[in-house]
Amino acid sequence: HLLMLDGNPIVVDCGLGVTRGIADQGVPLAAIRHIFITHLHSDHYLELGPLLHTAWTAGLSETVDIWGPEGLNAYWDFFIKSMQADIDLRIADEGRPDLRDLVRMYVLDAGDVDFPGAVQVRAMRVDHPPLTDTFALSFQTNETHVVFSSDTAYFPRLAEFAKGADLLIHEAMLVDA
């Protein structure tokens, strides 16, 4: 998902197609500064590395802050290791800044998120067994309030968390599953 608040693109989850989806909206990939990963199922973070690498090859030169559950940093470390030869070559050949220095990872937990600027961000743990670190997210400015449910089973507390939101983006699951 791509959320534009106060002119800043915020990416929520990075499943397959996120890079193309952002580009198709006319948002320069190099403008991405904030990414949230709601939980560690592949359809929510599989394309995080390729998104950042593609943004970097498109001119990303400023820090990107990423919030996600414990363990997301292991994915990032392995992605960077898998791309080490390409990263090192582009630094030497093209003079790019080191991608490894442009990413700051933060462990997401329930409560207020230390987010820069006027956007207030809150996270709430939801019910998505067998995972325990799955988070709904609330983004609020003086004018706009958007809530992402993440994947969740029936969870009545989500209604209170999303109360008053202008938009609730609620993921759904097949009953048989």
Image: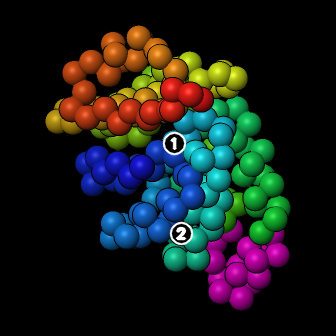
Q: Residue at x 45, y 33 (%)?
A: 172
Look at the image and name its color scheme: rainbow
Please tell me which residue lies in front, 147 or 169.
Answer: 169
Say which amino acid is labelled 1: Phe
Q: Which mark is residue 4?
A: none
List the residue tagged with mark 2: 55
Residue 23 is at least partly visible in this image: yes
Q: Residue at x 51, y 32 (%)?
A: 174
Disc 1 residue crowd, few under 14, some 14–19, many 20+, Cα 10 Å: many
Which badge, 2 or 1, comes first in the chain's sequence?
1
Q: Residue at x 41, y 63 (%)?
A: 22
Q: Which residues are magenta?
A: 84-98
Find residue 49 and report its horizontal and vertical position in percent. 65, 59
Please tell me which residue lies in front, 62 or 166.
Answer: 166
**Distance from Cα at disc 2 to Cα at disc 1:** 16 Å
Q: Residue at x 22, y 21 (%)?
A: 164
Query: Is label 2 in a helix, a strand or a loop?
Result: helix
13 with respect to 148 (left or right):
right
Q: Is residue 90 magenta?
A: yes
Find residue 63 and report its horizontal and vertical position in percent. 54, 57
Q: Is residue 4 magenta?
A: no
Q: Magenta region, mostly helix, strand or loop?
A: helix
Q: Which mark is residue 36?
A: 1
95 with respect to 21 (left or right):
right
